[in-house]
Amino acid sequence: MTNDAFSAAASLDELLTRTQQALAAMRSRACVLADGEPGELLRAEGAAAGGRVRAVAVQGGRLHSVVVDPELAGVSLEVLCGHLVDAVNDALSELDTRVGDSARADTDALAARLGGLPDQAELFSRTVHEVAARIRRDRDAATRAAHPA
């Protein structure tokens, strides 16, 4: 019975360790490298003016780059700014979708890992109660043997 308690505790500890690792992996996704460049961040591209204006946004809602086709050099500044806004908004909208999808996938994976936690906790609790009952029985038996009636 004692081995069951150790086994249940080890299983519970392993599940908690894996959960902590999953959370750490989720957090590390939103990192930025020391030089300020995006590391493993989600990226999305948006376009306007028939693809002649392109913007790339990265996780965290930051704009990574904007490229404007030189053919647009003759376009008015107001029109060009409108294309820039459209391309950036397109990229940010796509990024929102990707971040949401990624968060749902991470949450589902974490929930699957945590799914066994209640069963492991119940097994551990039951085993501890059984061990405590056995200790009480053994103690009571030893007391009765030491002090016969």
Image: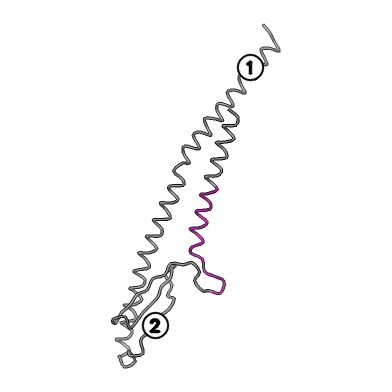
Q: CA distance from mark 2 to mark 1?
A: 82 Å
Which residue position is annotated with label 2? 67
Dominant secondary structure, magenta = helix
Helix or strand or loop: what does disc 1 sit on? helix
Location of the N terminus (image quadrant): top right
What residue is drawn where x is 52% and y is 56%? 24
The image shows residue 2 at horizontal and vertical percentages of 60, 29
Amino acid type, residue under disc 1 in the picture: Asp
Query: Which one is closest to the eye, mark 2 or mark 1?
Result: 2
Asked if 17 appears above or below 5 in the picture, the reply is: below
The image shows residue 4 at horizontal and vertical percentages of 56, 32
What residue is drawn where x is 50% and y is 54%? 23
The image shows residue 121 at horizontal and vertical percentages of 50, 37
Asked if 74 appears above or below 9 in the picture, the reply is: below
Q: Which residues are magenta?
A: 17-35
Residue 51 placement, left or right of 5: left
Taking depth in this image into account, of 7 and 23 the one nearest to the observer is: 7
Place residue 136 in its image quadrant: top right
Helix or strand or loop: what does disc 2 sit on? strand
Number of other residues with Cα within 10 Å of mark 1, as a class: few under 14, some 14 to 19, many 20 or more:
few
Verify whether residue 9 appears in magenta: no
Residue with the most extreme right position: 146
Q: Are marks 2 and 1 in contact (CB under 8 Å)?
A: no
Place residue 76 in its image quadrant: bottom left
Taking depth in this image into account, of 10 and 30 the one nearest to the observer is: 10
Asked if 6 appears above or below 109 in the picture, the reply is: above
Residue 140's disc number: 1
Residue 108 placement, left or right of 29: left
